[in-house]
């Protein structure tokens, strides 16, 4: 082989080696996409701060938060509606997002404590239907939060 051909062969080999090394660097050293940061605590903080500063009164008289399995959402909503009916009231499903949903129950203020106990402890169901004798109503906001 000639000296000129040998130089070209070495040049091509070095060029291809550099090309493969560059490709390997690009593939292995690419920036891995990082997961989106969890901003739920910041969102809650901003919401609570705005609520406190604006001074709007809460919509509900009583608020309670329950953590449930996402698969049991419909079952839990029906349980809350049935409980509200047992206490002489009604309940409707409110807004929802990917962290949970809300249910608003309207019952007599006399039964609010018992209603909250029955919500928090499903094994403690009221024995009989309780009918309100007054025309006053209390709004109970139940926030159903999905387990992480």
Image (tube, helix red, strand yellow):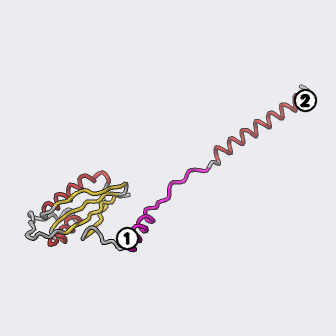
Which image quadrant is residue 126 in? bottom left
Q: Quadrant of the C terminus?
A: bottom left
**In the image, residue 37 lies at what x, y percent?**
50, 58
Q: Which residues are magenta?
A: 31-54
Where is mark 1, residue-wise? 51
Residue at the disc numbered 2: 4
Classify 93 as above or below 49.
Answer: above
Residue 86, position in %: x, y?
12, 62
Number of the front mark, 1 or 2 = 1
- The residue closer to the viewer here, 37 or 28, is 37
Q: Is residue 115 magenta?
A: no
From the viewer's perspective, tell me whether residue 70 is left or right of residue 87.
right
Label 2: which secondary element: helix
SS for tag 1?
helix
* Image location (x, y in percent) of residue 112: 18, 70
Front residue of 75 and 7: 75
Q: Residue at x 83, y 31 (%)?
A: 9
Crowding around mark 1 (Cα neighbors within 10 Å: few <14, some 14 to 19, many 20+) is few
Q: Residue at x 63, y 48 (%)?
A: 30
Along the polypeptide, which appears first: circle 1 or circle 2?
2
Whether residue 15 is situated above or below residue 43 in the rendered picture: above
With 16 as the anchor, is 50 left or right in this view? left
In magenta stretch: residue 44: yes
Q: Residues within 10 Å of mark 2 (few under 14, many from 20)?
A: few
Q: Main secondary structure of the magenta part?
A: helix
Tell me the residue at 20%/59% (across/down): 91
Answer with left or right where residue 38 lies relative to residue 132: right
Quadrant hosting residue 27: top right
């Amino acid at each position: 082989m000639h000296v000129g051909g040998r130089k070209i062969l070495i040049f091509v080999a070095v060029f291809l080696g550099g090309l493969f090394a560059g490709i390997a660097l690009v593939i292995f050293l690419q920036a891995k996409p990082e997961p989106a940061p969890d901003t739920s605590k910041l969102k809650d903080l901003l919401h609570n701060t705005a609520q406190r500063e604006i001074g709007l009164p809460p919509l509900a008289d009583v608020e309670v938060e329950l953590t449930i399995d996402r698969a049991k959402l419909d079952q839990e909503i029906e349980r809350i509606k049935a409980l509200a009916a047992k206490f002489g009231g009604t309940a409707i499903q409110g807004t929802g997002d990917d962290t949970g949903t809300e249910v608003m129950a309207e019952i007599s203020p006399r039964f609010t404590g018992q209603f909250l106990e029955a919500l928090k402890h499903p094994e403690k169901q009221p024995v009989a239907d309780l009918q309100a004798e007054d025309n006053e109503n209390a709004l109970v906001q139940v926030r159903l939060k999905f387990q992480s």
